[in-house]
Image: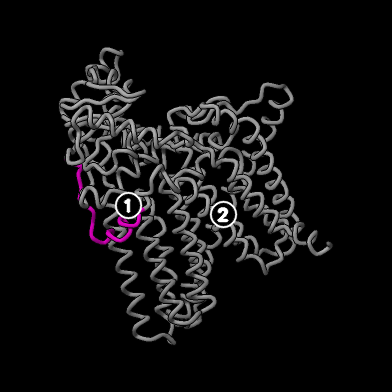
Amino acid sequence: MKRVRAIFCHPYLIVAAVVFGYLLVWTCMPIYPDEVSFRLNGARLFVDGGLQYGLYPACVSNFKVTHPIFYPVAAFYSILDSLPKWGGIRFIPFISLFLSVLVALSLISKSRFGWASGIFLIGFIGVSGSGLILSRPEWALLVHGMACLVSYYLLHVYRYSELVAGLVISGLTFIALLSLYLHVQGVIFIPLTMLPLALYLFRSDISQYARTLAIVAICIVFIGGWASIQQFHFRCPELPALERFISAMTIIGAYNEKGLLQSVVFLGDKFWRYAGQFQFKEVYDVSYLPSAIPTSMVGQYVVKLINEVITSLLSLNLFCSFAIASYSGMLIVKKLFISTNELTIKERLYGSAPYLFIFFAIGSLLVLFVYDAATNFYRSFYLNLLMTITNGIVLSFSASKLRWVLRQIGVISLLTCFYSAILTFEIIRPKIQSGQVGPSLALDTDWGSVRADVNQLKQACDINDKITKIMMDDMTYDALKQNSHLISFTYFSLSASLSGGSAEDQLQAHSALFKRVSPNAAIMLCSNFSTIGLNPTSQKSSLCCAKF
């Protein structure tokens, strides 16, 4: 009995259990529009024959061909998309997040970090679970970063056999390509990917086969990085307003749009926009979450207190990231150039390797933090989590005098995560389950009925599987994903709405863009037809169809 009690009182197990419970509460999250768009944009290798039509149908000049280097990962992602009824859409991020925490805890298991390990829970505070659990490219970025960490330990620190090393190098290369294929943000981890491979190459106890494998992996990752930049370089001369809209999501675009002074002011306000994404509040961006404010005065006071703690923990995490990156940068300069003592390049690299890894990891995340002018909730949550994991591992090697402070922060983080899960379970989750899903789709939608309705509409409007350029929306994508060259109404409407103006002007803009895109058919919610000013041919429940 005492042994069982000791196991359940172990800090690492408590942290892992709280993370599991926190993520479990958020598995009710509805299907966010971005989850549909990224499947549409990257999971159609077999259906579209390697062509990438993009999300914006009017931007014909932005159509691309999948680079051959991405074929294996594109095929893998397409297989995931082939699962019926959105299978695995919450399971894959859930497993990725939970395993990442388990890996981090296992790496510090010998450091006697104790309750200070609760600082890993800074990555799971407030409403961050709402974005972490989404099937967006950020889950692949997390897996990419953790793969680099594991590879560093297995290839450089522990030095396993060549068979294990070959499997590690192959796995790291595949994961890096998947991250680069899904989003260009994966390029921030290219230096981190190269480091364990370069360190492995400097070893004198490996065969020529193992050396060749590492060199090939380095070349593949470099080509993948270049291909990712080319693939995600957005251009749309057909719609200049859309091109400016996309560009303004980065700090460079904001600078080009607003100038230096306004960009500095914009950056100065960034932290408060960033922290606001994590807090429990009344209104969220595009109403992706329902109100998280309790009705009672006591509940409102508790939420206000938790929001203050969340802001403090986020500030502390960012400060630690900047301090650790700066300190590791100074140590790199010292190890490589100052305290050389006639050491060889190999010895200098080995001596500075831990600091290089830390600098590449945290420095890359801080660069993306600044570069991401849009500060969207999903990316903010993952940046915070990745910084938390990196900071936690680094601080686990800290001096004993710092441990007492870290234990207090760890306990506060654990309590904040625990109460965040309770608030979510009591306030947000019931509202989502009752249908308050904003622009998203309820996860428990009867997808079998939707598919049956779509099949009946296809017969009624004479739309067969060979017809291309079908306009669809988030509701009908799963039932139509076997058709080639689908057109997203969500992003079609976004392109048209950027022109602004009155409701009549918007209707004209949608109608004019529809003529330019000229789809062959449409199967989507009936309300979307009225947005364009079209009359559907047939209707089934809330879905309608038309053939043009």
Residue 508 drawn above or below residue 454? above
Q: Residue at image x 49%, y 60%?
A: 146
Q: Nearer the viewer, residue 80 or 439?
A: 80
Q: Write down the residue under mark 2.
A: 98
x%, y% of residue 272?
Answer: 54, 34
**How packed is label 2: few (under 14 Cα within 10 Å), some, or many (20 or more)?**
some
- Per the image, label 2 sits on a secondary structure element best described as helix
Residue 88: percent from left, percent from top: 45, 48
The answer for how far apart the CA atoms under marks 1 and 2 are is: 24 Å
Is residue 67 part of the magenta span, yes or no? yes
State left or right for residue 403 relative to residue 534. right
> Which type of secondary structure does the marked residue at label 1 adopt?
helix
The residue to which callout 1 is attached is 78
| Residue at the extreme right | 2
Residue visible at 17% across and 41% down in the picture: 466
Majority secondary structure of magenta residues = helix
Res. 247 visible in picture: no
In the image, what residue type sits under mark 2?
Phe
From which residue to which does the magenta span run?
A: 61-79
Where does the image place residue 365, in percent across and percent down from the top left? 47, 52
Residue type at mark 1 is: Ser
Is 39 positioned to the left or the right of 271 in the image? left
> Could you tell me which residue is drawn at 50 percent across and 65 percent down?
149
State the residue in front, 236 or 12.
Answer: 12
If the image is split into quadrants, where does the N terminus sit?
A: bottom right
Between 404 and 278, which is closer to the camera in this rendering? 278
Image position, residue 530 (x, y; %): 28, 18
- Quarter of the image for residue 278 reads top right
